[in-house]
Image (cartoon, coloured by chain):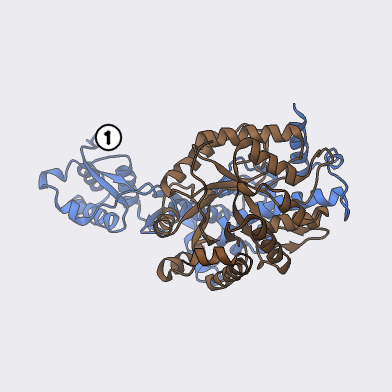
Chain colours: A brown, B blue
Amino acid sequence: MNGAPAPYLGFGLGLRPQHYKEILEDSPNIDWFEVISENYMVPGGNPLRMLDCVAERYPVVMHGVSLSIASTAPLDMEYLSGLKSLAARVNPKWISDHLCWTGVHGVNLHDLLPVPYTEEALRHVVDRVSRVQDFLGRRIAIENVSSYMEYACSEMSEWDFVGELARRADCWLLLDVNNVFVSGINHTFVPTAFIDAIPQERVVQFHLAGHSEGNECLIDTHDEPVCEEVWDLYGAALERFGPISTMIERDDKIPPLADLVAELEHARAIAARVLPQAAKASAA
Amino acid sequence: MTKLANLQSTIQQAILGDKPDAVKLVRKPVKGTPEARLDVYRDAYGLRLTEFIANDYPKLKCYMGEAKFTALAHAYISRHRSNDPNARWYSRHLAEFLRASPAYVRKPELAELADLERCLSEAFDAVDAPVTTMGELAALEPEQFGTVAFDISPSVRRFKVRTNVTSLWSSLRCDEHPPHPIMLDADQELLVWRQGTASRFRMLGNEEAMALDAAREGVSFGVICEMIATMDDPDTAAVRAATYLRGWIEGEIIAGLRSGGNNPDRPA
């Protein structure tokens, strides 16, 4: 698929209603925002009004949770039309969603269910990503999810599946560093093995987030600050991929904006340490 | 059915509650069991949908209390599967569910509180529309007043209540102990709409409710005045109609003026 390369945006946050006022009045040190697409796929009112205001001042990317790219149910063209309309309004730098399925037979489980890493599933997802990109007229970025189970039928590693998907579908990747860590603990693989296997030229964005401990595995809850191990992995990811647009996700127990800005400063500091040249270029 | 379709169908069944076939699809983890790993997804399904419902009906949750509200959510979840990619629509049948469920049918204030919260939520992000001003109304020629009709804001919702649900809602909003639920002597007309960026509601008298409903149907102002004249003192009908209209415009309920109305047969 033709198209311009993804721009480097710097350090961003997820846009949350609790922070609208402060963002618009105080212009805090945040380079860009990621918005949950579905939260703004509404008829009108204040959410869209706020989004318009933010999009006038900051670069925005759209991040969805309902594309269900790996589902064997037909693509939801009504959803895709809504996504395309929102993109026409917001002019996002890119659109992303997850490597997962959310339901079949007309049911939506509202969860990011993992894919079996088989050749059959890979062909299926490649076909659907290509069709979505054709419909939207742009590349999309696909994100690796946190998972709590592996399928017995999987024939390859998650990282081989993700890399091959990006190559065959000619799509971008959103590398969620926390998800790599969570899945690594849950399925006992070395997180850096995942990162080292992902094709460098495909990654356009990093996600950072917190997680919590479940009974026998880590759960991707986005309700805590980023932990030390994930910061370390972020450093490793920067070393491999270079300057990549980075954002912190927080979806529950949402703290004051200043706390998230401070957390973002930590990401900037790591990037400045790992990539001093890139940090200077960004500051200039 | 392909292997992938089969797998997804079986895993979905497991998450919805029936999992024997699904366990063999899950690789044995180093820590724990395949059953426990599947349970992470099954438990998350119930928790997530319960959270959606709680987010949509905060006053109802406060009124019922955590335990009873959670029981209601579980009952709703067992009856309703989500079929929309957008979670905000999942709980839209809650008021109907409350009305139809034997466990709640003797507490009509619950369904009415759900109705009110749902309407406020729908008004909040209803389609945007222009706001007609008093200046635009004043610019009409005197002879146009009889034939002018109104575009009503798409945020407007209208319904009747039989209980003191508005008092319950207002108390809950102020974190006060709500009054006992009571049945009203007569049905009460309610109006829900968006003014600026905020959802609002207010009670309507029968006459204003009739006038607003007629305006929504495109009936011209002249005919609305005639209809009002049949409800009470005909000599003050025009003044009463003008008062209602002023309130609608100041409340941002009128989204446009147009000439000619979709008038019913005039009263004899």
Q: Residue furthest left?
A: B142
Residue at 85% in and 37% down: B21
Residue A137 against residue B205 in the figure, above or below? above
Q: Nearer the viewer, residue A134 or A242?
A: A242
> Would residue B6 be found to the left or right of residue A277 on screen?
right
Residue A113, horizontal then vertical, whole percent? 71, 45
Residue A192 is at least partly visible in this image: yes
Residue A107 is at least partly visible in this image: no
Q: Amino acid at mark 1?
A: Pro
Residue at 57% in and 73% down: A262
The N terminus of chain A - image quarter: top right
Q: Secondary structure at mark 1?
A: loop
Residue A49, horizontal then vertical, whole percent? 40, 55
> Would residue B175 be found to the left or right of residue B81 on screen?
left
Q: Which residue is mark 1?
A: B264
Residue A225 against residue B76 in the figure, above or below? below
Residue at 63% in and 43% down: B82
